[in-house]
Image: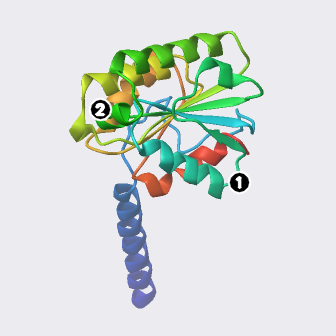
Amino acid sequence: MKSNILKFAIFIFILIILSFISNTSKIQVNDDIYALPSLPRPIAEDKVLITSAGQSTDTYIIKDIANKLMIHNFFMPQAKDVDLEGVNTVVFVVGYSAIGEKLHGLTYAEEKKRIENLIQKLANRNITIITIFIADRENKNKETDEFLNITCKYADYVIGTQNNNNNSSLLELAKKYKFPLTIVEDVTGLSEPFVSAFR
């Protein structure tokens, strides 16, 4: 009888330890109404335009993820409003890169104007907007913050990675603009929330 009680006590102790380990390994975002592990139902459709907001190379990561998930996409890092024809979803990959802009012959002012024009056109169309931010906040700059603010303001969904406390800045924007937000540990966790927007 005593051995059964001891076994049961050990079993309960192991369960408590496992539960603690499981909970601490998860990303602590906050018990916030805007923070979700992924979307509960799709909000977007194929024919996706993937573009940059800041000309960082992060855009290529999202293109590769979309291709692996077999999501029909058009990859146009410097997309303009004329490229919205036939598009059902626009994905903005945010991250300012002075080198990227220079390589594409753009200034910050020109890139900002391009994004603002796209957003203005999208506001008048039934097109889903997804913003993705996977840059490292260690390299934080006001240009990236500006692009985040512009694209998140009208976003239907935002996905970010937990780099140098992206959590707090993205949560602040989620509360301000009322969009659903998913924060994953790193780029390897992007596929699940991204695909949840489509199926």
Image quadrant where one finds the C terminus: top right
Residue where numbered disc 1 is placed? 70
Name the residue at 69% across, 23% down.
Answer: 84
The image shows residue 102 at horizontal and vertical percentages of 33, 32
Callout 2: SS: helix
Q: Which quadrant of the view contains residue 144?
A: top left
* Mark before the other along the chain sequence, 2 or 1: 1
**Mark 2 belongs to which amino acid?**
Ala
Which residue occupies 75% across, 39% down? 46
Secondary element at image label 1: loop
Q: Residue at x 40, y 23 (%)?
A: 147
**Outermost right residue:** 86
Three-letter amino acid code at the position of disc 1:
Met
Left or right of 17 on screen, residue 123: right
Residue 98 tag number = 2
Q: Residues within 10 Å of mark 1 (few under 14, many from 20)?
A: few
